[in-house]
C-alpha cells in the first residue's frame, strides 16, 4: 500500500562510521596565530623542514598525538618509501613522518577509501590533503603549530593552522560533491563532510576537535586558512588537484555528471498547459471553446429546422398562425385523437386492436406473452411452484458461501502485470516487510494556525513511555509468548530496526539526559550520518525525514509529528502460516493503541493515529456486519413503498381489499430469492463473494426488479374489468412484455459487460448482479405473474389482503361501479393534463432540447476533470481508526515509497557486458542503469525518482578492489578475514583495536594484476559474492553487504554465471494524491522500458503500491471501451426487438447523453474514476434503458402523428415510469445514504441518485420531446387477432387457480 512510503529507513541497515576516527580534523576558526618559540621547539618554516614529527603521546581513547618539534625532513628506507608511494604517490624523496605515523595514517584513511573509490579523482584529492599533512617534506611551509599540550610529561600538538590554497579547496570539493554513497542512497559528503555545501564547511567539519571518548573526530584542532600573513615565510599547500571530469581517472557519470563522456540529464518536460483561446484577458480552454461553438451551431440548426417545419405547417394548413406555439384548434385535435387512442386502450389495450404498429419480433413477442400470460393465469400454482423450486435449488449453493477480504485479491486481477512482478520479487528476493506505525501530532491552536513543534522534552518523554508499553506487549501464539523482538526486522545484531527519533538515544531513556536531551536530538537531525552518538541502536544512521513529519525543507526542529515505524518480518502468503505470529502481535498492538495509547496521547493535547499491516483486512471484515441494519431497513422501506404503489387509490371502506401488501411482500421475497440464487450459483462453482455483493446487489436488484413489477401491475389495472382475469393478464403481458424484456436483457448485458473489468471485486460484482437481474426477470414473468393472478382473484372474491382466507360479505363491501371500474390515479392525471400538454408546446420543446444539449456539452468538458484513483479511506467504514491514519500520513509524511529496479538474468561472467551496463563506478558505461537512475534523480518532478540507487554491484566491486584494502581480505588458508575492527580480529572486551593478533597475516583478496580491467573474473565473482553479502559493515569497511543487501540478490543457481534476480533500491518522491501514485508508477515503467530497450536486458520497477494502482494507468481506455461495448449491446438488442434503426438510434443517443451527464456530475462531486465507478457507469447504461424503452415502445405502437404518439406514450406509460421506475429506484437508493461504509455512500448512493434524477429527466422530459421532433414515422403492419379466441373466454368463469 501507499503507507509503505513511510519506511524508507529500514532499507538502510548497516553501520557507517566517519572515516577520520582519529585523523586530525579541521575548523576554520578565527583564532590568532600562536608561534611556538621556546628552547625545545623553534618554529622554522622552510622547505625540507617538518612542523611535526613522530608520536609523543596517546589520549585515553587511543588516538595518537604528534610531536610538536620542528626538524629537517628525513630520508626513508626503501621499504617505507614504497609503502608511502603506494598511498601517497605525490610524496617523493624525504618525508616528515615515521613508519608508525604512516601506519596510523593508512589505517585511518582506509575508512574513507571504500566510500570514495568509485571516483578516483575525488579519492586522490582527498588522500592528498592528509598525505601532505602527515608526510610532506615541506610540511613546515603550510603547517603552523599554534597550541601544545602535555601528555605523560611529553609535549604534544594540540592545535595547528593548515594553509591551503583556495584553488585546492575548491578543486577538492568540486571533485567530491557529487560522489554518492550508494548503500545509503545519499552523497558521500553526508558522511565524510556532514553534508558540507562548500569547501569551507567541509574543512570546518574535518578540523573539529572532539573530547576523548566522544567518538570520531580529531584529537587536536585544525584551522584551515587560505591566506598567509604578509610577514610569514609560509606558503599555502597547493598540491595537484584532479578534476572528476578527467577521463583518465575514470569517474563514473553518477559521481561526476560534468564528465565530458556523460550526457546531461534530460530536462524536465515543460508542464503541459492545456490548449487555450484568449479573448483579451479571458482564457478559455480549446475544448470548452469548441463545445460552445458546437452548441451555438446546433441551436442555430434547431431553430432553422423549427422555422422550416413551421413554414411547411403554415403552408399545409393555409394559416398564418405562429408555428412555434400550437394553436387552440390544433391542440384540441391532438387531445381528441388522444382520447380516441385512450378509448381503444380501454376497450382492449393497444395490442388488442385490429391494427397494430409492431415489428415482426415485437409482434412475435407480443403474441408469445399473450399466449403465455393466458396459460400462466389458468395455471398459477404450477408456474409459481416450479419457478420457486429452481431458485431455491440454486440457493442451496449458499452452503459453500465464502467472503473474500484480502485487499490484493479484491482489487488486483490475476493477470495483472504488477501482480506478476510482485510475485517474482517476493519469491526471488524477499517480500516487503510488514509495517506497524504510530503517528503522534500536535494540534493547531486555530483552524488556520500553524501547529506547534512536537520536539519538546515532555513529548520525547511521552515517546519513551509509549515505546515501553509497546515493548511490553506479549501475546500467546501456539503456546509461546510473542513480543516485538521476536518478529521485528533485525538487519544487524539483535536490535530492531525501529524508526523513531528515540534511536538518537539508542532507544535507552537513560541516555536522554546523558546525551543532552532535546539539544542532542536537534543536533542529530543535521549530523545523523557523521556523529557516532547519533547512530541508532541497530548500528545505522537514522534519517530524520523517516521519523518526523509536518516540517518544510530540512527544518526538522519545526516538525509537528512523530512517525514511529516498526518494520516486521514478512513471509510469502502462500507458504504456510509464517505470518501468524506477526498477525497475533498486530492485534494486540492495535488493542493497546486504542485502549491505552490513545487516551495517554490525548491527555497531552496531541493526536494519535495508528495502523498495522493487517489493519485493512480486519477493518474490511468488520465492515461486512456494519450495515446489516441498513440492509434490513431498506427492504422494509421498499416493501412499504411497493405495497402502496401497487395498490389502488385508497378508500377507507375498501382499502383492506384493494391494498397490495401481500403482493408487495411477495415481490420483495422474489427479489431476495433472485439474489440468493445468484450468490448460491457462483458459490457452487467456487467464486467467493465480496462485501459489495452482500450490501449493494440487494439494493440494486430490488430497485431494478420492482420496476417491472410496478409496470406489470399498472398495465393490469389499465385493462377493462369486464374481461376475465386471464385475458387481462394476457393483454397486460402483451402490452408491456416486449418492453420489459428489452429493458431486462439490456440490463443483464450491461451488467455482464462489467465482468470484463480486471479488478476482481468489480468483475465478480458484475457477474453476480447480471445473474441476479436475470433470475429476477424470470421470476417476474413466472412467479410474480402467478402471484398477481392470485391477488386479483382475491380482490374480486372480496378477500382481505394479508388474510386471504377471510372473506368479507358483499353487503359490507358496498360495491359500486367506481370500484370495479379502475380510475386514473394522481400521477396519470398529471401526465395527461399537465406534463404531456406542456411538453407538446413548440417553445417548450426548443427550450428542452437546448437545455439538455447544453448540459451534455458542459458534461463533456467536465469529464476531463475526473481524476483516476480510489482513496483508501473510501473503502473503509466511516468510523474506522484508519480514516485518521491515512489523513495524517498524507499530511505529515515527507518521504516517498521505496522503488526497486529489478534486473532479471544478470550475466556476471567476464565475457558479458552486463556488469558495465549496470554499475556506476569508474570504468562503467556512461549510460548504465545506475548512471541513468542517478541522472533521472536530478529531475524528480518528472521522473518521480528522489535519489540515486543503492547498488549492491557497485559496493561489491569496490569491496573487492585492492584500493579498499580493509574490506575483502583472506587468511593464509584462503578463508574470509573480516576487517581489523571486527571479531575475531578485534574482540569487544580487549579495548581499542590495534595491529597484530589473529588477523596480522591477512592480505587483500586481490592485487590489481589478479583482476581484468579492475573487474573480477567469473570464478572470482562467484567465489567472493557470498563473502560480500555476509560481510558486516564497520568503520574499517563501510561497504559490507550484510543487512543493506542481504535480500538484494537471488543466489539460487547463481553458480551458472547468471543471477536470476537482483534489485537496486531507490525511492520515489513523496506522493500524496492518487494522481501522484499513478504518475510515479507510469514514469518508473517508462524509464524501465527505455533502459530495457537500450541495454537489451530485462528490467522492471517494483514498489509496494504498484499492485493497487496499475488499473489506473489505462482506466480511461478501459472505461471508454467497456462503455462502448455496453452501448453497442443495448443498441443491438433494441434493433433486433424493435426492428427500427431510427428508434434504436434515438434510444442510443439518449443513453449516451445520460451517461455523459452522469460523468459530468461525477466531476462536480469529485468522484474518481476507478473500477468501481466504471462498473457503475456501465450498469447505469442498463438501468437508464428502463427510463427510455417503455416510452419508446409505447410511442411505436401508438397511431397518429408524432406529437399525438408522444403524448399517448406519456399518458400511457409516464405514470408507470415515474412511480414504478423513478420512485422505486429513488427509495432504494436513498437508504444507502445511511450506510456506514463510505464507498457505498460515494459510489452507490451519490452515483445512483444522480442516475435516477438524470434518467428521469431524460426519459420523461427529453425523450418525449425528441420523439415528437425526430421520432420514426408511423409504420403499420396488420395483425389479425383471433377474436374468436376471446369471445368464448368472455363467457367462461375465471380460474381460481
Image: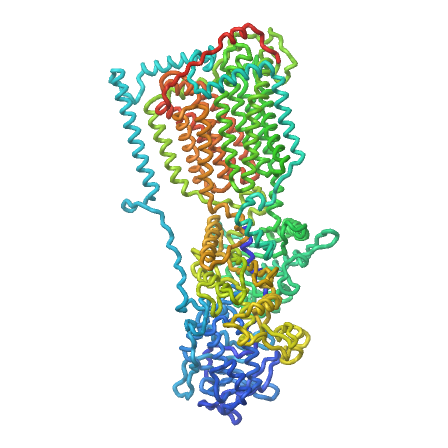
Residue at 47% x, 47% y: name it: 1113
Residue 523 can be seen in this image: no
- Identity of the residue furthest to the right in this view: 479
- Residue 943 higher or lower than 321, as above or below: below
Q: Quadrant of residue 1018?
A: bottom right
Closer to the camera in the image, 1092 or 822? 1092
- The quarter of the rendered structure image containing the C terminus is top right
Residue 1200 can be seen in this image: yes
- Residue 1160 higher or lower than 1088, as above or below: above
- Residue 223 higher or lower than 1095, as above or below: below
Residue at 51% x, 87% y: name it: 96
Q: Quadrant of residue 322?
A: top left
Question: Residue 427, how many percent across, how many down?
Answer: 60, 54
Left or right: residue 394 versus residue 186 is right
Question: Residue 315, how many percent across, how many down?
Answer: 25, 18
- Identity of the residue furthest to the top in this view: 1291
Residue at 36% x, 49% y: name it: 273
- Residue 614 higher or lower than 1025, as above or below: above
Left or right: residue 981 versus residue 711 is right
Tag count: 0
Question: Residue 818, how many percent across, how many down?
Answer: 51, 9
Closer to the camera in the image, 764 or 289? 764
Question: Residue 772, how many percent across, how many down?
Answer: 57, 30
Closer to the camera in the image, 859 or 1237? 859
Snapshot colouring: rainbow
Amino acid at each position: 500500500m501507499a503507507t509503505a512510503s513511510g519506511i524508507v529507513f529500514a532499507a538502510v541497515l548497516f553501520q557507517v562510521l566517519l572515516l577520520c576516527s582519529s585523523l586530525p580534523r579541521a575548523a576554520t576558526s578565527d583564532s590568532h596565530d600562536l608561534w611556538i618559540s621556546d628552547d625545545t621547539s623553534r618554529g622554522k618554516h622552510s622547505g625540507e623542514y617538518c612542523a611535526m614529527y613522530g608520536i609523543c603521546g596517546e589520549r585515553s581513547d587511543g588516538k595518537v598525538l604528534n610531536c610538536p618539534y620542528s626538524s629537517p625532513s628525513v630520508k626513508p628506507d626503501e621499504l617505507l618509501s614504497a609503502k608511502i608511494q603506494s598511498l601517497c604517490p605525490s610524496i617523493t624523496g624525504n618525508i616528515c613522518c615515521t613508519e608508525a605515523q604512516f601506519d596510523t595514517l593508512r589505517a585511518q584513511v582506509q575508512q574513507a577509501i571504500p566510500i570514495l573509490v568509485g571516483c578516483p579523482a575525488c579519492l586522490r584529492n582527498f588522500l592528498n590533503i592528509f598525505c601532505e599533512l602527515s608526510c610532506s617534506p615541506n610540511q613546515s611551509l603550510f603547517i603552523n603549530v599554534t597550541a601544545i599540550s602535555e601528555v605523560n610529561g611529553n609535549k604534544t600538538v594540540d592545535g595547528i593552522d593548515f594553509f591551503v590554497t583556495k584553488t585546492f579547496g575548491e578543486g577538492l570539493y568540486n571533485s567530491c560533491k557529487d560522489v554518492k554513497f550508494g548503500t545509503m542512497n545519499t552523497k558521500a559528503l553526508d558522511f565524510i563532510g556532514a553534508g558540507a555545501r562548500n569547501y569551507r564547511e567541509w574543512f570546518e567539519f574535518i578540523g573539529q576537535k572532539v573530547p576523548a571518548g566522544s567518538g570520531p573526530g580529531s584529537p587536536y584542532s585544525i584551522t584551515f586558512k587560505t591566506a598567509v600573513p604578509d610577514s610569514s615565510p609560509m606558503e599555502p599547500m597547493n598540491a595537484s588537484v584532479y578534476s572528476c571530469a578527467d577521463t583518465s581517472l575514470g569517474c563514473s557519470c553518477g559521481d561526476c555528471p560534468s564528465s565530458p563522456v556523460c550526457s546531461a540529464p534530460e530536462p524536465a518536460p515543460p508542464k503541459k498547459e492545456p490548449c487555450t483561446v484568449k479573448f483579451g484577458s479571458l482564457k478559455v480552454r480549446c475544448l470548452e471553446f469548441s463545445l460552445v461553438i458546437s452548441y451555438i451551431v446546433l441551436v442555430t440548426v434547431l431553430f432553422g429546422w423549427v422555422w422550416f417545419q413551421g413554414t411547411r405547417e403554415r403552408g399545409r394548413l393555409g394559416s398564418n398562425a405562429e408555428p412555434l406555439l400550437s394553436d387552440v384548434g390544433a391542440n384540441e385535435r391532438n387531445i381528441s385523437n388522444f382520447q380516441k387512442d385512450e378509448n381503444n386502450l380501454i376497450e382492449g389495450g393497444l395490442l388488442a386492436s385490429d391494427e397494430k404498429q409492431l415489428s415482426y419480433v415485437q409482434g412475435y413477442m407480443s403474441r408469445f406473452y399473450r399466449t403465455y400470460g393466458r396459460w400462466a393465469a389458468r395455471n398459477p400454482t404450477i408456474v409459481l411452484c416450479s419457478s420457486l423450486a429452481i431458485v431455491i435449488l440454486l440457493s442451496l449453493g449458499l452452503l459453500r458461501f465464502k467472503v473474500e477480504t484480502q485487499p490484493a485479491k479484491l482489487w488486483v486481477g490475476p493477470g495483472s502485470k504488477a501482480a506478476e512482478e510482485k510475485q517474482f520479487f517476493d519469491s526471488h528476493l524477499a517480500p516487503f516487510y510488514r509495517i506497524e506505525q504510530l503517528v503522534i501530532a500536535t494540534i493547531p491552536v486555530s483552524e488556520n494556525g500553524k501547529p506547534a513543534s512536537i520536539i519538546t522534552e515532555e513529548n520525547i518523554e511521552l515517546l519513551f513511555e509509549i515505546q515501553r508499553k509497546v515493548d511490553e506487549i506479549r501475546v500467546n501464539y501456539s503456546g509461546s509468548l510473542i513480543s516485538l523482538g521476536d518478529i521485528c526486522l533485525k538487519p544487524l545484531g539483535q536490535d530492531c530496526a525501529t524508526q523513531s527519533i528515540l534511536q538518537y538515544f539508542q532507544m535507552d531513556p537513560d541516555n536522554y539526559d546523558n546525551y543532552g536531551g532535546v539539544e542532542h536530538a536537534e543536533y542529530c537531525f543535521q549530523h545523523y550520518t557523521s556523529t557516532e552518538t547519533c547512530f541508532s541502536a541497530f548500528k545505522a544512521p537514522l534519517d530524520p525525514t523517516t521519523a518526523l513529519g509536518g516540517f518544510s525543507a530540512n527544518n526538522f526542529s519545526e516538525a509537528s509529528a512523530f512517525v514511529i515505524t516498526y518494520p516486521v518480518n514478512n513471509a510469502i502468503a502462500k507458504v504456510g502460516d509464517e505470518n501468524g505470529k506477526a498477525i497475533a502481535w498486530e492485534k494486540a498492538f492495535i488493542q493497546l493503541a486504542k485502549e491505552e495509547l490513545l487516551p495517554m496521547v490525548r491527555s497531552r493535547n496531541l493526536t494519535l493515529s495508528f495502523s498495522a499491516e493487517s489493519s485493512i483486512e480486519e477493518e474490511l471484515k468488520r465492515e461486512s456486519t456494519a450495515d446489516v441494519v441498513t440492509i434490513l431497513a431498506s427492504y422494509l422501506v421498499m416493501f412499504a413503498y411497493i405495497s402502496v404503489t401497487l395498490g389502488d387509490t385508497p378508500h377507507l371502506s375498501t382499502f383492506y381489499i384493494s391494498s397490495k401488501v401481500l403482493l408487495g411482500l411477495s415481490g420483495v421475497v422474489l427479489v431476495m430469492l433472485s439474489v440468493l440464487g445468484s450468490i448460491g450459483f457462483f458459490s457452487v462453482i467456487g467464486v467467493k463473494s465480496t462485501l459489495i455483493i452482500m450490501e449493494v446487489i440487494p439494493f440494486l436488484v430490488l430497485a431494478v426488479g420492482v420496476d417491472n413489477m410496478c409496470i406489470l401491475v399498472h398495465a393490469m389495472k389499465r385493462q377493462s374489468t369486464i374481461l376475465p382475469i386471464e385475458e387481462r393478464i394476457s393483454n397486460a403481458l402483451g402490452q408491456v412484455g416486449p418492453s420489459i424484456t428489452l429493458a431486462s436483457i439490456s440490463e443483464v448485458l450491461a451488467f455482464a459487460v462489467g465482468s470484463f473489468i480486471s479488478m476482481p471485486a468489480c468483475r465478480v460484482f458484475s457477474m453476480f448482479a447480471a445473474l441476479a437481474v436475470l433470475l429476477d426477470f424470470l421470476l417476474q414473468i413466472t412467479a410474480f405473474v402467478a402471484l398477481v393472478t392470485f391477488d386479483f382473484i382475491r380482490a374480486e372474491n372480496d378477500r382481505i389482503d394479508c388474510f386471504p382466507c377471510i372473506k368479507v360479505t358483499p353487503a359490507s363491501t358496498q360495491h359500486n361501479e367506481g370500484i370495479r371500474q379502475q380510475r386514473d390515479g394522481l400521477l396519470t392525471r398529471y401526465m395527461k393534463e399537465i406534463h404531456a400538454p406542456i411538453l407538446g408546446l413548440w417553445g417548450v420543446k426548443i427550450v428542452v432540447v437546448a437545455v439538455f444539449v447544453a448540459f451534455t456539452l458542459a458534461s463533456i468538458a467536465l469529464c476531463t476533470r475526473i481524476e483516476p484513483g480510489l482513496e483508501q479511506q473510501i473503502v473503509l467504514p466511516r468510523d474506522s481508526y484508519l480514516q485518521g491514519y491515512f489523513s495524517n500520513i498524507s499530511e505529515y509524511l515527507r518521504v516517498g515509497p521505496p522503488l526497486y529496479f529489478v534486473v532479471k538474468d544478470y550475466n556476471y561472467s567476464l565475457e558479458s557486458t552486463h556488469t558495465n551496463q549496470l554499475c556506476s563506478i569508474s570504468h562503467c558505461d556512461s549510460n548504465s542503469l545506475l548512471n541513468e537512475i542517478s541522472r533521472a534523480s536530478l529531475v524528480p518532478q518528472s521522473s518521480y525518482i528522489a535519489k540515486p540507487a543503492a547498488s549492491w554491484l557497485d559496493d561489491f566491486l569496490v569491496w573487492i578492489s585492492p584500493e579498499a584494502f580493509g574490506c575483502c581480505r583472506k587468511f593464509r588458508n584462503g578463508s574470509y578475514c573480516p576487517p581489523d575492527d571486527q571479531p575475531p580480529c578485534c574482540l569487544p572486551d580487549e579495548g581499542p583495536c590495534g595491529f597484530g593478533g589473529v588477523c596480522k597475516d591477512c592480505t587483500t583478496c586481490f592485487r590489481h594484476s589478479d583482476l581484468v580491467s579492475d573487474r573480477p573474473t567469473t570464478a572470482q565473482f562467484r567465489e567472493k559474492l557470498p563473502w560480500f553479502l555476509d560481510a558486516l559493515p564497520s568503520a574499517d569497511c563501510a561497504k559490507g553487504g550484510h543487512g543493506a543487501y542481504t535480500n538484494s540478490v537471488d543466489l539460487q543457481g547463481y553458480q551458472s554465471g547468471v543471477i536470476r534476480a537482483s534489485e537496486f533500491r531507490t525511492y520515489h518522491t513523496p506522493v500524496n494524491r492518487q494522481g501522484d501514485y499513478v504518475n510515479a508508477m507510469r514514469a518508473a515503467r517508462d524509464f524501465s522500458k527505455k533502459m530495457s530497450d537500450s541495454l537489451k536486458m530485462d528490467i522492471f520497477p517494483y514498489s509496494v503500491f504498484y499492485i493497487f494502482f496499475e488499473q489506473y494507468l489505462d482506466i480511461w481506455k478501459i472505461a471508454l471501451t467497456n462503455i462502448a461495448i455496453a452501448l453497442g449491446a443495448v443498441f443491438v438488442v433494441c434493433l433486433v426487438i424493435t426492428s427500427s434503426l431510427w428508434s434504436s438510434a434515438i434510444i442510443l443517443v439518449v443513453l449516451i447523453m445520460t451517461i455523459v451527464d452522469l460523468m459530468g456530475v461525477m466531476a462536480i462531486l469529485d468522484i474518481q474514476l476507478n473500477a468501481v465507478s466504471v462498473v457503475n457507469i456501465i450498469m447505469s447504461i442498463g438501468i437508464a434503458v428502463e427510463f427510455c424503452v417503455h416510452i419508446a415502445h409505447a410511442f411505436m405502437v401508438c397511431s397518429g402523428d408524432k406529437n399525438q404518439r408522444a403524448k399517448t406514450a406519456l399518458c400511457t406509460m409516464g405514470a408507470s415510469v415515474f412511480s414504478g421506475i423513478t420512485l422505486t429506484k429513488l427509495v432504494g437508493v436513498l437508504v444507502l445514504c445511511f450506510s456506514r461504509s463510505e464507498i457505498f455512500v460515494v459510489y452507490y448512493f451519490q452515483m445512483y441518485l444522480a442516475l435516477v434524477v438524470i434518467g428521469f429527466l431524460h426519459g420523461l422530459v427529453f425523450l418525449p420531446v425528441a420523439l415528437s421532433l425526430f421520432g420514426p414515422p408511423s409504420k403499420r403492419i396488420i395483425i389479425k387477432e383471433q377474436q374468436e379466441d376471446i369471445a368464448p373466454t368472455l363467457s367462461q368463469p375465471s380460474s381460481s387457480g
